[in-house]
Image: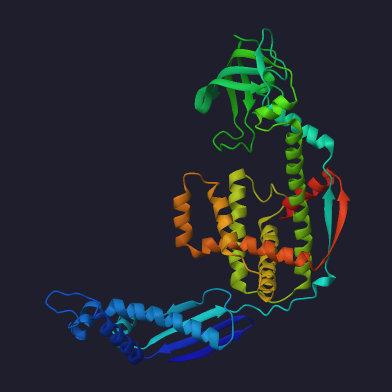
Amino acid sequence: MQVTETLSEGLKREFKVTVPASELDARLNARLDSLKNEVRLKGFRPGKVPVDHLRRLFGKSTMAEIVNDVIGEVARNTISERGERAALQPDFKLSEDEKEADQVLAGKHDLTYTMSYEVLPKVELKDFKSVSVERPVAEVKDEEVDEELRKLAETTRTFTAKDGKAADGDRVTVSYVGKIDGEAFPGGTDENAQIRLGTTQLIPGFAEQIVGMAAGDEKTISVTFPENYGAANLAGKPATFDIKVKEVAGPDELKIDDDLAKKLGLESLEKVRGLIKQQIQNQYGNTSRLRVKRQLLDQLDELHKFELPPTMVEREFDSIWREVNADLKQSGKTFSDEGTTEEAATADYRKIAERRVRLGLVLSEIGERNKIEVTDEEAQRALQAQLRQYPGQEKALIDYYRQNPNALASIRAPIFEEKVVDYLLELVKVTDKPVSREDLMREDEDEKATA
């Protein structure tokens, strides 16, 4: 067997590999000799099937397996002997000559092919003590708890039927038939729709035109579906709705007391307030962590500059680009609508792809050097959390993860990243910065815009 390096440029490696036909044939004979003790063929006693007969029956298929094994062995051995780490699975190019391929499978021709791969760059980690981040901290105020408590109480509010015209705050029960160009459209009909006037988010202008109607009143209203409406066949189109009001009900007094807590399954109003406050604190804590993590990753990105495996960057970019275009298609927008061009967006998202690959390699190096690992228990908890999102499909999902190692790795990856971030936050300088709720959440929106 001969492995000759033909390219060593940056992170790219390429080799010409030649495996003599004699070596392949020797492997085939050994495999067939082992096989004769396993197969059962009519007319032959166990273990007495001639190897030549087995070659005629299974020679090509067995040689195909041997060729596949040899290619894998050569790749593993070459990378190991050179002390390199491949960024991705090596790429192999075999001869496209069908006659030559048949000769190889028949054991009469040398196997020749090209093997290429990219190596992972050497990552020189910088001194993290030079990194400092600000952690925004927002205090949960009583007014915020009161606001959320009132919203929660609204979900239990009762209504009493009344005479007279509907006003904002009332709940109306209506039947309606929606039409476009005079024809009823699928999903545009309801016999007992309950609408809370002044609060329900419907098609713009829909609920507003019901205000002033009384039980028994009928009316045809005109609206226009928003351009970004979820159903693409209705987005941006004008429509009419034939409305009949069946009942107008006014809101009963909103009581926020221990009885409300019991309706919610808790023993006291104080327990409800405590739970709401904890939920808000968790939300603020999660948002604060995102801010800190973003600052940390920004500085890691600035500190570490090294050559990136081109194929890794290209695959990351392709993944991002597919998602971007899918989002544009779903929203019916173009790059122009987003205030950019395809060329400029391509350049921006390629930089994002490079950043993700660079940070991935840096975090991986930090984790490896400091023996940071994801335990099976942590992976199982994450898997169970994902399964809970798809009730009734648990078995199918478990089978999918069992059959796709890369999918299971995608569950471990974010856990690993968070553990490395936790490790780094113990090393870098973290300063708490008190901020208002508005500032914290406004930063959150900025984060979404630049993610």
Residue 352 lies, in percent from the top left, at 69, 62
Residue at 76 percent across and 67 percent down: it is 424
Who is closer to the viewer here, 60 or 227? 60
Judge whether 233 appears above or below 87 on screen: above
Q: In the rendered view of the protein, which quadrant contains the C terminus? A: bottom right
Rendering quarter of residue 198: top right
Point out the image quarter for the N terminus. Answer: bottom left
What residue appears at the point 69 percent right and 10 percent down from the top-left corner? 165
Residue lying farthest to the left in this orientation? 43
Q: Is residue 12 visible?
A: yes
- Residue 338 screen position, x and y as percent: 70, 49
Q: In the rendered view, would you say 17 is above or below 442?
A: below
- x%, y% of residue 448? 72, 51
Q: Please provide percent x and percent y for residue 295.
A: 79, 61
Q: Nearer the viewer, residue 237 or 128?
A: 128
Image point (33%, 84%), residue name: 104
Q: Residue at x 71, y 17 (%)?
A: 252
Q: Is residue 439 left or right of residue 55?
A: right
Query: Between 274 and 388, which is closer to the camera in this rendering?
Result: 274
The way the protein has been coloured in the rendering is rainbow
Q: Quadrant of residue 321?
A: bottom right
Whether residue 411 is visible, yes or no, is: no
